Amino acid sequence: MSEQQGHDHRHDDDPRGHGHGHGHGHAVSADADRRYLRGALALLAGFMAVEVVIGVIAGSLALISDAGHMLTDAMAIVLALVAMRIAARPPRGGFTYGLKRAEIISAQVNGITLLLLAAYFTFEGVRRLVEPPAVEGLYVVATGLAGIVVNVAAAWLLSKANRSSLNVEGAFQHILNDLYAFIGTTIAGLVVWLTGWNRADAIAALVVAALMLKAGWGLVRDAGRVFMEAAPARLDPAEVGRQIAAIDTVVEVHDLHIWEVTSGYPALSAHVLVVPGADCHAARLAVERLLRERHDIGHTTLQVDHVTPDGHAFDENGALRRLTPHCPDPHGPTHHSPRPDDAAVAATASAAADHTAANWAATCHDGDHVT
């Protein structure tokens, strides 16, 4: 549930005045349906136990590797359930965002587990290619067909849950990959049963290992981006900065940061400079509207100030450039207005120096926080 509160703060120590906006989107996604997750978990756990027993009896590495993959599927669902419960706790103490990144830890653990299992089954599959043991093809075919049915049912259950969460989506992808693996295992069992070529089982195990590697690397990579506070993969910070700078009255954007609190929860902060005499709050609202409508970013923290008079000039290419620093330690690239129009020229005009502190304070007299 999102809340909205208005807070006005007068900055008496700064005659220019500031517009600070905080737009928060706390209700990023609904909770995944725990009932569907538990149903999929029960299916996987029960079949996994049966598959291990049959794999040992049949001497099939492909079946045992499939069971290992199903173990990671079950772990993904368990961790998803735990992470969902933890992430739902409200912010408190030093955890100002709450514990929303619990799901990212879950995804990272699942990804690493998949990579370790992929390494083991690759080693064992290569060894069995060199020295293929006897494999009971009929057992493999029967178990593989049953596995296809179970994984189709589990994937259907998880597809009905909320997949905007990275660990829930990871669990779904695990099961989907496991379904492909069972198809490969069934084909391998059929080859062994009909031809007696036992190496088909090892090849199927290597296919399963490749699927584990792909899924594991994807989870580790995506979770790592969240931990490193990278911008969401779907967003280009440079393009976002250019779009903000193109808004009327905006002269410059710097200290632009985009990150994810957790999967599906993007956040942004930026320092925006507008022409002298412009309404800082109106500019902030325009930026928030752009970010919300074009990029689906609802959690924003924006500081909006007037540009320093005579602080910018046009270079020989007609592009607007800063002459004097505005912040002591700016971070990241700076985006300037692309328009050599009246609004941008106003930032370079010496007449702007005639704007007194009282005039600025009258236009942007209060900070505006929306939570």
Image: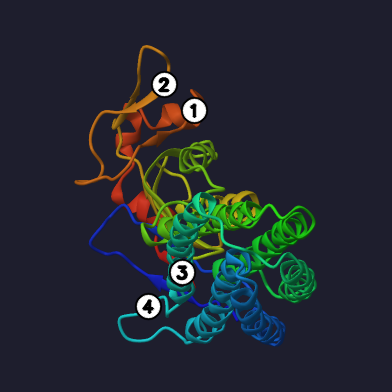
Q: CA distance from mark 1 to mark 3?
A: 38 Å
Q: CA distance from mark 4 to mark 1?
A: 37 Å
Image spot of residue 320 (x, y percent): 39, 25
Q: Which one is in front in this view, the residue at disc 4 or the one at disc 2? A: 4
Q: Which one is in front in this view, the residue at disc 1 or the one at disc 3? A: 3
Which of 18/151 is in front? 151
Q: Is residue 143 left or right of residue 279?
A: right
Q: CA distance from mark 1 to mark 2?
A: 7 Å
Label located before the other in sequence (2 or 3): 3
The residue type indicated by label 1 comes to Pro
The residue type indicated by label 4 comes to Thr
Q: Is residue 13 left or right of residue 289?
A: left
Which of 93/322 is in front? 93
Kindly state the secondary structure of the residue where label 4 is placed.
Answer: loop
Q: Residue at x 56, y 53 (%)?
A: 206
| Residue identified by numbered label 4 | 96
Which of 91/179 is in front? 179
Q: Are marks 1 and 2 in contact (CB under 8 Å)?
A: yes
Disc on res. 9: none
Dividing the image into 4 quarters, which one contains the N terminus?
Answer: bottom right
Label located before the other in sequence (1 or 2): 2
| Residue identified by numbered label 1 | 338
Quadrant of the image occupied by residue 109: bottom left
Q: Are marks 1 and 3 in contact (CB under 8 Å)?
A: no
Binning the other alpha carbons within 10 Å of mark 4 as few (below 14), some (14 to 19) or many (20 upward) gives few
Q: Are marks 4 and 1 in contact (CB under 8 Å)?
A: no
Label located before the other in sequence (1 or 3): 3
